[in-house]
């Protein structure tokens, strides 16, 4: 097994298995784009590259050298190699799901851009933090050993705020 790598056989294997090399490259590029890029549209493009790599893997793994289509002739079944149609059917279904996912993600990007004016995740996170929609990172406050909630997170009792629970808890109207 290791003798192939020392004699240049690994290069021959990679040259004959170019679909798997393309799979690995597309998968790595797509994953990198989803993780490292701060733009939401570019993350969606990375997701599409990642999905395409998975489709390529399914199709490449279904390939049978010398195989034919799995249709039984009228004279009866003949012996021989057949290509399994299952990976092709799964890829067709995955393509439909992928297109739907892309359409919904792009529609959400349009709504996000209309609302916030940016598609950068770091800017969106800061804008949402400023709005109070997401909590800010934890402060340097030490955790409580007794397990009691902090005074800022404890809800006041109904009598402490002056609100009467019987009238819906609101102020005087």
Image (cartoon, helix red, strand yellow):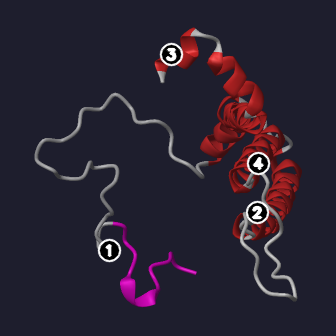
Residue 91 is marked as 2
Q: Are marks 4 and 3 in contact (CB under 8 Å)?
A: no
Give how far apart the Cα atoms at labels 4 and 2 are.
9 Å
Give how far apart the Cα atoms at labels 3 and 1 are.
78 Å
Residue occupied by mark 4: 56
Give how far apart the Cα atoms at labels 2 and 3 are.
36 Å
Which mark's residue is nearer the viewer, 1 or 4? 4
Q: Which residue shows up at 83% across the image and 52% down it?
A: 109
Q: Earlier in the sequence, mark 3 or mark 1?
A: 3
Give how far apart the Cα atoms at labels 1 and 4 are.
62 Å
Magenta stretch? 161-173
Q: Earlier in the sequence, mark 4 or mark 3?
A: 3
Which mark's residue is nearer the viewer, 3 or 1? 3
State whether residue 90 is above or below residue 47. Answer: below
Q: Identify the element where label 3 is drawn.
A: helix
Quarter holding the C terminus is: bottom right
Residue 149 place in picture, x, y as percent? 24, 52
Q: Identify the element where label 4 is drawn.
A: helix
Crowd rating for badge 4 (residues with CA inside 10 Å; few <14, some 14–19, many 20+): many
Q: Earlier in the sequence, mark 1 or mark 4?
A: 4
Residue occupied by mark 3: 3
Magenta segment main secondary structure: loop
Crowd rating for badge 1 (residues with CA inside 10 Å; few <14, some 14–19, many 20+): few
Classify residue 111 by image quadrant: bottom right
Classify residue 145 by image quadrant: top left
Q: Earlier in the sequence, mark 2 or mark 3?
A: 3
Q: Identify the element where label 2 is drawn.
A: helix
Residue occupied by mark 1: 158
Classify residue 29 by image quadrant: top right
Give how far apart the Cα atoms at labels 4 and 3 are.
29 Å
Crowd rating for badge 2 (residues with CA inside 10 Å; few <14, some 14–19, many 20+): many
């Amino acid at each position: 097994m290791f003798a192939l790598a020392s004699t240049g056989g690994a290069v021959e294997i990679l040259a004959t298995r170019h679909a798997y090399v393309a799979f690995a490259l597309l998968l790595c590029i797509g994953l990198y784009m989803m993780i490292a890029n701060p733009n939401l549209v570019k993350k969606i493009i990375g997701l599409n590259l990642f999905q395409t790599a998975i489709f390529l893997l399914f199709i490449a793994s279904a390939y049978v050298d010398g195989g034919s289509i799995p249709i039984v002739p009228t004279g009866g079944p003949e012996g021989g190699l057949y290509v399994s149609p299952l990976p092709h059917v799964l890829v067709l279904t995955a393509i439909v799901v992928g297109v739907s996912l892309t359409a919904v993600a792009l529609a959400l990007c349009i709504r996000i851009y209309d609302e916030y004016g940016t598609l950068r995740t770091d800017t969106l996170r800061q804008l949402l933090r400023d709005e109070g929609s997401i909590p800010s990172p934890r402060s340097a406050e030490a955790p409580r050993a007794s397990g009691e909630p902090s005074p800022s997170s404890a809800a006041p009792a109904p009598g402490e705020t002056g609100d009467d629970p019987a009238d819906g808890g609101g102020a005087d109207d």
